[in-house]
Image (tube, rainbow, N blue to C red):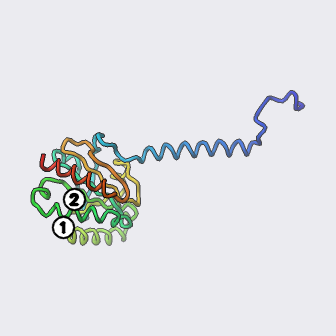
Amino acid sequence: MDMKNRPSFSRRSWPARLLSAASAAALSLALISGAALALPSEGDRAPNARLEDADGRELQLKALRGKPILIVYEDKDSATQNQAFKDALAKLAKGDRYRKTIALAAVADVSSYDFWPVKGFVKDAIREESRKVGATIYCDWDGAFRTAYRLRRGISNVILVGKNGQVLFAAEGKLKPEAQRKLLELLRKEVEG
């Protein structure tokens, strides 16, 4: 078959066509994955998810419906990203009204430590930190909570779920002052009516 009778294909070589197809597939996968990791949107129904504390006591978030739920999801490297917000929250929690009304789900992403003997050391550290902050810190050992809420690893995630089970606020990374004010105001509205 001479060149004149050859079917018309792209003049690019097959490796170039393969590379182009692979690049398109990778871009599509990245776009799909990015969308899959988008935080829940305001108004979304919050998914039920299971957590456990360092002693293995289970918590299903659906058991907290009827109360506003503040979820702070972090790992050891992102735990200080929203320290200013956590300090402001601690001031609010000094009053019984907030402490009794808001369900705090402080969640540690410990999925990188779900193996023996490290898991035991991590449980001890979580118990100690829980005592220090005066609140239960729950553990996400297998990443299932992170997946259910479409959270990114290695970054602080803050979500407020209203009494009705709908997401009122969701943010990742360090909260800017205006986001902190918005979240604190939403908390006040949920507590004070």
- Marks 1/2: CA distance? 17 Å
Q: What element carries label 1?
A: loop
The image quadrant where one finds the C terminus is top left
Residue type at mark 2? Arg
Q: Which of marks 1 and 2 is in front?
A: 1
Q: What is the crowding at mark 2: few (fewer than 14 residues within 10 Å), some, or many (at least 20)?
A: few
Q: Quadrant location of residue 165?
A: top left
Question: Is the residue 102 above or below the residue 131 in the image?
Answer: above
Residue holding disc 2: 57
Rendered residue at 23%/50% (across/down): 60
* Residue at the extreme left: 96
Q: Residue 134 carries which label?
A: 1
Q: Residue 33 carries which label?
A: none
Rendered residue at 76%/35% (across/down): 10
Residue type at mark 1? Gly
Image location of residue 137, percent across then percent down: 25, 63
Image location of residue 157, percent across then percent down: 34, 55
Question: Is the residue 172 above or below the residue 26 in the image?
Answer: below
* Residue at the extreme front: 178
Counting labels gives 2
Left or right for 34, reference 165: right
Image location of residue 32, percent across then percent down: 49, 43
Rendered residue at 24%/56% (across/down): 105
Q: What is the crowding at mark 1: few (fewer than 14 residues within 10 Å), some, or many (at least 20)?
A: few
Q: What element carries label 2?
A: loop
> Which of the two labelled residues, at mark 1 and mark 2, occupies the earlier sequence position?
2
* Residue at the extreme top: 5
Left or right for 78, reference 168: right
The image quadrant where one finds the N terminus is top right
